Image: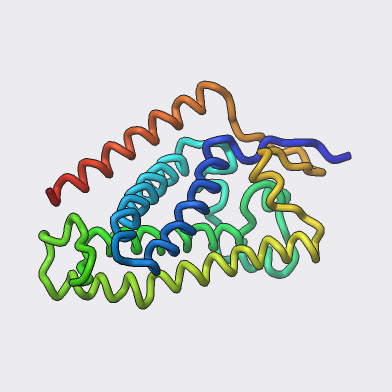
Amino acid sequence: MATQVRVWDLPTRLFHWTLVALVTALVVTGHVGGAAMEWHARLGYAVLTLLLFRICWGFFGGRWSRFSSFLHSPPTVLAYVRGQAHPDHLAGHSPLGALSVLAMLVFLLAQVATGLIGDDEISFTGPLNRFVSNANGLAATWYHKAIGQWAIVALVVLHVAAVLFYLWKKHDNLIKPMVRGDKALMVAVEPSRDDLVSRVAALLVLGACGGIVAAVVRLGS
C-alpha cells in the first residue's frame, strides 16, 4: 500500500516555481530589449539570490533537497539507466534527473555571472563590468547571448519533456509532489523536514543571500 511521504519541503517548492517564473520573464525581457533591460537585470539579481539560496539549501534543507541525496556515482547512474533503480531514486531526484538539476544550476550561475560583467554596448552594462577588461566584457556578453541562453532553453525543454515522459509513459506524476510536497511511495523512506523552524531558517538564508547579491551589485556603483 502506498504511503504519502513529504519529499519536497515548502522552501524547495517555492524556489522551483519562482525560478520558473523568473527564467520565463528573463527570456521575455531579454528579447524585448531596450527599456526592458532594466527589469532584465533586476530579474537576474533575483535569480542569483535564488541560486545562492538553493546551494545553501542543498546542504541544510530537507532530506531530498540536499545534494547528498542526489549526487550519484557513475556506476549508480548506469545502473539506473539499465533499470536497476534503488528505492531512493523513486523518492527524490532520479540519477538522470539529478544531472539535469545540476546542469541547470551550473548554466544559470554562468548566465548570471556573464550578465554581471557583460557589456552589450547598446542598452546594458553589468554592475561588475568595470572590474574586467573590455574584451572580457564583450566575450561575456557574447556567451550570454549566443550560448548561455540557448543552453538554458534546451535544458528547460529537456526537463519538461522528461516530466511529460514520466507522466505519460511511466504514469509517474512528478508535478504533483512539487506542488503539494508529498509523494505516494510503496517503500518507506525518510521524509524531508518541513516544519515552522525549517521554513523560518530558509527565510533567513534567503534574506542573507539577498543581502550578498545586493552587496555585489553595489560594488559596481
126 w.r.t. 2: above or below? below
Q: Nearer the viewer, residue 12 or 218?
A: 218
Q: Indicate the quadrant containing the N terminus: top left, top right, bottom left or bottom right.
A: top right
97 w.r.t. 57: above or below? below
Image point (21%, 59%), residue name: 126
Q: Nearer the viewer, residue 80 or 183?
A: 183
Image point (51%, 27%), residue name: 198
Q: Position of residue 124 (x, y in %)?
A: 23, 63
State whether residue 79 appears in this view: no
172 w.r.t. 211: above or below? below
Q: Position of residue 60 (x, y in %)?
A: 46, 36
Count the labels in the image.
0
Image point (59%, 69%), residue name: 158
**What is the residue that sits farthest to the right in this orientation?**
1
Q: Position of residue 33 (x, y in %)?
A: 33, 66
- Determine whether, in the image, residue 215 is placed left or right of residue 65: left
Image point (16%, 61%), residue name: 129
Q: Quadrant of residue 114?
A: bottom left
- Determine whether, in the image, residue 195 is placed left or right of residue 149: right
Q: Quadrant of residue 109?
A: bottom left
State whether residue 151 appears in this view: yes
Q: Position of residue 42 (x, y in %)?
A: 32, 50
**What is the residue that sits farthest to the top in this orientation?**
197
- Determine whether, in the image, residue 5 is placed left or right of residue 140: right
Q: Quadrant of residue 73?
A: bottom right
| Colour scheme | rainbow
- Determine whether, in the image, residue 129 is placed left or right of residue 7: left
